[in-house]
Image (cartoon, rainbow, N blue to C red):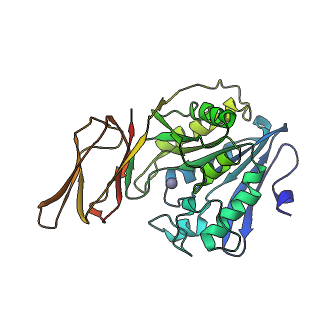
Amino acid sequence: MIENLLHTKTGEKKEFFLEINGIERLPVTLIEGKEKGKTLLITSGIHCTEYTGIETAIELAQELKPDQIKGRVILVHPVNRTGFEAGQLNSCVPKDNKNLNRVFPGNRDGSASEQIADYIVTNLHSQADYYIDMHGGNIQEDLTPYVYYVTVTTPEISQKAKEMANRVNVNYKVGSKVGGEGSYNYAGACKIPSILIERGCGGIWTKDDVVLYKEDIKNVMRFLGILEDSIQEIEYKPKRTKQILEIYSSVAGCWYPAKRAGEKVCKGELAGEIKDYFGNIIEKYYFKENGVILFQISSLGIQERQNIITYGQI
Ligand SMILES: [Zn+2]
């Protein structure tokens, strides 16, 4: 039955909700192009406070015209709708407080998040020839725009995903070493060329960021031959990070990062300090390699064993 929902007449656009076992309703826009071709799946809001990606998907769903599309586009905007409406600060699914992007491929008989993941794999990944998952920094994160592509897959699929990532207008790309947990990671392991774009952060979205994000998606679509709007696709070739490094807090307290996301760092440089409530330094953190900060915690309050900085070695 869902198969029928995900098709419409050639040259038509359809808006509807997909019901998941009474626990979630996904807003979906389906565009059936002017001629047959490949299917592109675009999801946003798997993390419900990453607003830049969600607003971008909502606007794209309205702006993309079926007569400019070759093939089919399925947009979900947003996936974690219940969390979005509840203003769920940690971006988790409210019913089980789990991070949806850590439970793929999910479980049909599992908790709410696991059922949503299983539904997406079974009914949406299964339709896709290509996949773009739209993210950004969370409310407590400072982030520089970058893109991940899948590598835990065949060399051909990884190469195609890398070529998609090369069409995103950001400074850095990361070859993901994970083959599950995340929606796009699992899709990659199932031989779907997949990328995850990070743009926007801090619980806000701006029109300028949405314009850039829409252009990212359209440029990848032009490269894939799915969007035919007479604009030439551009290859940006973001710099590839050698490895991803994470710094974790060893104590709870007040967090004072030394740098901003997007700044380059040198081996041995101060990354930040945690102080107690009386201004005394409890712990100092240093970078172990030369690199660039992809994202870091921007909130003052920090808990023990929290990922406070993620940086890419360059
Ligand atoms: Zn996210």
Q: Quadrant of the N terminus?
A: bottom right
**x, y percent for residue 276:** 16, 65
134 over 252 or under it: above or below: above
Answer left or right for 85 relative to 276: right
Name the residue nearer the viewer: 229 or 217. 217
Name the residue nearer the viewer: 267 or 46. 267
Q: Quadrant of the C terminus?
A: top left
**x, y percent for residue 48:** 53, 61
Specify whether residue 112 is in view.
yes
Specify whether residue 60 is in view.
no
Answer left or right for 78 relative to 225: left
**x, y percent for residue 120:** 70, 59
Please name the residue shown 44% across and 34% down the image: 242
26 over 288 or under it: above or below: below
Q: Quadrant of residue 141?
A: bottom left
Answer left or right for 313 relative to 258: right
